[in-house]
Amino acid sequence: MKLITFLRSRTESRPRKVFTFVSLFSGGGIGDVGFARAGGKCMLAIESDTLRAAIFAANLNATVLNAPIDSPSFAPRHDLRALLRTEVDVALVTPPCQSFSTANPNRGRRFDIHSSASDARTSLFFSALNWLDVLKPKLIIFENVPNFFHRCLASPDGQLLGTVSNFVDSHLHEYIPYRTLVNMTDHGVPQRRIRSLGFYCRRDILKQPLQWTSGRHWLFPNNWKSTNSAASTITDITAGAALSDFPTLDASSVGSARDPHDPLHFVPTYDPVRYRWVADIPPGSGRSAYENSHCTQCGATNIPVDTMHCIFCGSPLLNRPHVKLPNGSYRLIHGFATSYRRIHPGFPAPTVTTASSHLGSSNTIHPFQNRVLSIRECARLQTVPHFFDWTAATDKRRYYAIRQILGEGIPSWFMYQLASRVKRLVT
């Protein structure tokens, strides 16, 4: 299947091989839909958030247990496999990534045991291991941020210290592990998204253990052949190409910020001050508003990026991100090099995050238009099929939740490609 078909076609011929899977920390099912399109049948999903559980249930015909995975009343039953009436082929394990991420300097500190202990989400994967003990799937796939397996933390009883990989490897002693980093761009996703993947195959079904442990097994993404040629009829996976077919929007007014034909293709509007920051960034430049280098008062150009005032006439550069202080003076807003920056159209888009609607977040401004990306465009960069059902979240109070789900998810197209190979291993 081509990516363009994957995105637009609601139906396809039924895959010859069907396999079963469960989804722990299922979120909204962004990656799971890719698994289902490749022939996967989701038998069970666990998701503590009600909205995410509802979106998952709307898109995958599966039992969704809507409660925290570590809830005492929700402990895995020893007859669970009998209740599912089939052996589970694959378990997808995607714990909340926020406590493992290095995007926030107060989170994701690899060797800080105290930091990990202060965030209850860090140890949720221990509860997932208890579920895996009961399910005993043929293959377990962990997915998370690059820092995940290196994170140091304490066991739930506080008696043992180690990395995530230490705990998982010792617990899953019936499995042979292999861990790797994958950039989704290498596999036809129009987005730079580097993730950590852990593959744990049950020893009794693995036919090529040496290839597995050495990383040369055909299942692993780095060994996939001709990936980009199979990606899509959109052979160019740049941000400019991926976003080229959406109707134009503009953040200057409510009317121009919405597509009347698509409730998910809309963007926040800005007051004239903030709109000017964006509008003055040259379209297609990939530059930031801090680099707006012309003075609107005297016409001077090439003004250094680290100043709030024109070095020639002294006027404040109001086309740069700034705040007005109580005394009437101005200062630049503190930000990173990627803040208030247009996405460069000639490269894959940066990582879609949960903060995709924030003007000052990392690389969120449209390559050419004066606005951030819409929800629909973020879904495109995450390669979510057009028919994906967001109905449970399509009211004004919940639109931001869709952006969070997209920022947390695994690109659907990548998971489809992975599942197409997984079923050869487990069926």
Image (spheres, rainbow, N blue to C red):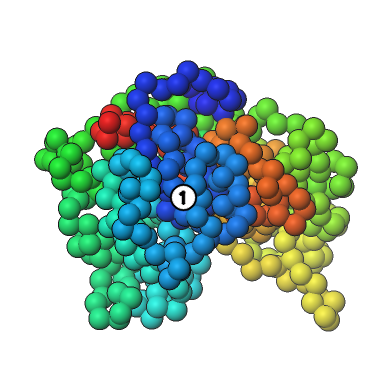
Who's the residue at 58% across and 53% down the image?
A: 52
Tag 1: amino acid? Ala
Who's the residue at 79% across and 57% down the image?
A: 274
Where residue 323 sits in the image (x, y, percent)?
Answer: 76, 69
Who's the residue at 58% across and 25% down the image?
A: 10
Farthest left residue in view: 210
**Left-right relation of 192 to 378:** left
Q: Quadrant of the N terminus?
A: top left
Where residue 312 sits in the image (x, y, percent)?
Answer: 76, 62
Tell which of 383 and 188 is nearer to you. 383
Q: How many marks?
A: 1
> Residue 305 sits in which quadrant?
bottom right
Q: Quadrant of the C terminus?
A: top left
Q: Which residue bears the numbered disc 1?
A: 45
Where residue 310 sits in the image (x, y, percent)?
Answer: 75, 62
Tell which of 359 and 209 is nearer to you. 209
The correct choice, above or below, for 175 with respect to 61 in the image is below
> Local crowd at mark 1 within 10 Å, few (<14), some, or many (≥20)?
many
> Residue 291 sits in which quadrant?
bottom right
Tell which of 18 and 273 is nearer to you. 18
Residue 403 seen? no
Tell which of 369 and 415 is nearer to you. 415
The correct choice, above or below, for 218 with respect to 109 in the image is above
The correct choice, above or below, for 370 with respect to 359 in the image is above
